[in-house]
Amino acid sequence: MNENDNKKTLEQTIRNFCEASTAKFNNEKSEILLIGTKEYRNNIIKTETINKTNNDKLDQAIRIIEDNDLLRILGAHIGNDSKTNIQWKTILKRQSRILKKWAKTSLSSKGKELILKALI
């Protein structure tokens, strides 16, 4: 959404989707990743509104992802002004240790070959 969008339109779209798909929207598990200028993002965080004209407050149960914070979507971490490379370095180190342990086990030569290729 941008500052000209209407929150009620979004809410109606979500209700329509849930009704058509029999899905349930859970605000307590929902997060918003703000997009736009730093000034715009900070204004939304401060006022908890997207559209200045309507002054519609965001649901308090929905978490707003602030700068330097991360949102996890399907295992990927994204965010504004965040250091995701630190997170990925940790994951890659852990996976490399696991693969090295597997390479020492009694796998078939083909299995070891695949693991060694993954390490490169």
Image (tube, rainbow, N blue to C red):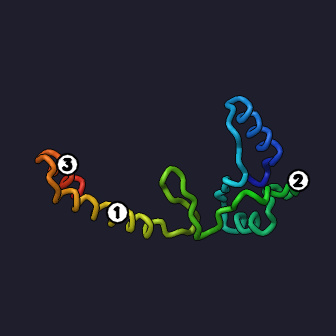
Q: Do the residues labelled 1 and 2 touch (CB within 8 Å)?
A: no
Residue position for label 1: 92
- Residue positioned 27% across, 64% down in the render: 97
* The C terminus: image quadrant: bottom left
Relative to 82, 28 lies left or right: right
The residue under label 2 is 54
Numbered badge on residue 55: none
Q: How crowded is mark 3: few (under 14 residues within 10 Å), some or many (20 or more)?
A: few
Secondary structure beneath disc 1?
Answer: helix
Alpha-carbon neighbours of circle 2 within 10 Å: few (<14), some, or many (≥20)? some
* Image point (22%, 61%), residue name: 101
Residue drawn where x is 32% and y is 60% of the image = 95
Helix, strand or loop at mark 3: helix
85 displayed left or right of 41: left
Q: How far apart are marks 3 and 1 (CA)?
A: 17 Å
Q: In this view, does 111 lie above or below 22?
A: below
Tag 1: amino acid: Leu
Which residue does the numbered mark 3 point to in the structure image? 114
